[in-house]
Each structure stands twice: as structure tokens, then as C-alpha cells.
Image (cartoon, grey):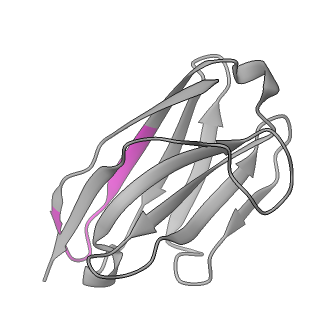
Amino acid sequence: QVELVESGGALVQAGGSLTLSCVASGRTANVFRMGWFRQAPGQEREWVASILWRHTATYYAATVEGRFTISKDKVKNTLYLQMNNLNVDDTGAYYCTASEGSGSSWDYWGQGTRVTVSS
């Protein structure tokens, strides 16, 4: 079992920046990849970015590429999402996730942290 706890959500003005953190604990040795999803009010949860835990590869949704950066600190077992040039469409609950395999499913989820971007 892997536990994930997000933090860093806040109210920010459009054009601003914010960094989210996610601390992983438990059986982290089994983690293959980690990622971020988000869910806007009334919308389905969507994938934002992901990173391989033992390699450098990163992946981004087209809507955030060039503005968001996913990174990790393996010593601290912490995942980050640096978000720049935020716009109102980035508003939502952001969820940290982890998986033990490379398939389409994700095995573990955090409780989420809320980001609100005001115009």
C-alpha cells in the first residue's frame, strides 16, 4: 500500500504560479510512476502529467505542456507540480497518483488539493 498526501493548493490570480507537493509513504519501493490528475467542477477527472519514478521521462497533457513542470525528489519521496502562467481553466482539485505498473490504470490516489485561479 502507498499513501499519498498532497499540499500546496491555493487561490491565485491568473498569470500567477503555484507549486503542488505530494508526499508518498508506505511501499514506495514498488512505485513505477507517479502523476497528477485534476478535476474541474462538473467535469471528469483528467490526466495532467506523469513521471517515471526510476527514470527521467516526463509526460504532459497538451493543455499544460510548456506551463507545468513535474518533478520528484526520491530522497524525500516527494512529487512536485510547478504550475506557471495559470489561467481560470486550471481551476480544480488536483490529485496525486501512483502506479506499480505501466498500464492505463493507477493504483493509489491522494485526497486532492484545491487550486482556484481567479481572473
At horizontal 51% and vertical 61% (from top left) the residue drawn is 37
- Residue 37's place in the image compared with 67, above or below, is above
Place residue 71 in its image quadrant. Answer: top right
Q: Classify the position of the C terminus by image quarter.
A: bottom left
- Residue at 29 percent of width and 82 percent of height: 42
Viewer-nearest residue: 66 or 38: 38
Which residue corresponds to the image point at 19% horizontal and 53% vertical from the top-left? 10
Q: Is residue 69 or residue 107 the one in the foreground?
A: 107
Residue 25: image location, x then y, percent: 56, 19
Q: Residue at x 38, y 48 (%)?
A: 19
Residue 77 located left or right of residue 52: left
Q: Magenta stretch: dominant SS?
A: strand
Q: Can you tell which quarter of the image residue 108 is in?
A: top right
Report whether 14 appears left or right of 104.
Answer: left
Please give the count of numbered marks on the rendered protein: 0
Residue 77 vertical position relative to residue 42 in the rendered view, above or below: above
Question: Could you say where residue 105 lies in the image, as x and y percent from the top left?
Answer: 73, 57
Say if 87 sits above or below 115 in the image: below
Magenta span contains residue 67: no
* Magenta segment: 12-21
- Eyeballing the image, is 67 above or below 21? below
- Asked whether 18 falls inside the magenta stretch, the response is yes
- The residue nearer to you, when weighing 117 against 98, is 98
- The picture places residue 112, in percent across and down from the top left corner, at 36, 48
Q: Quadrant of the N terminus?
A: top right
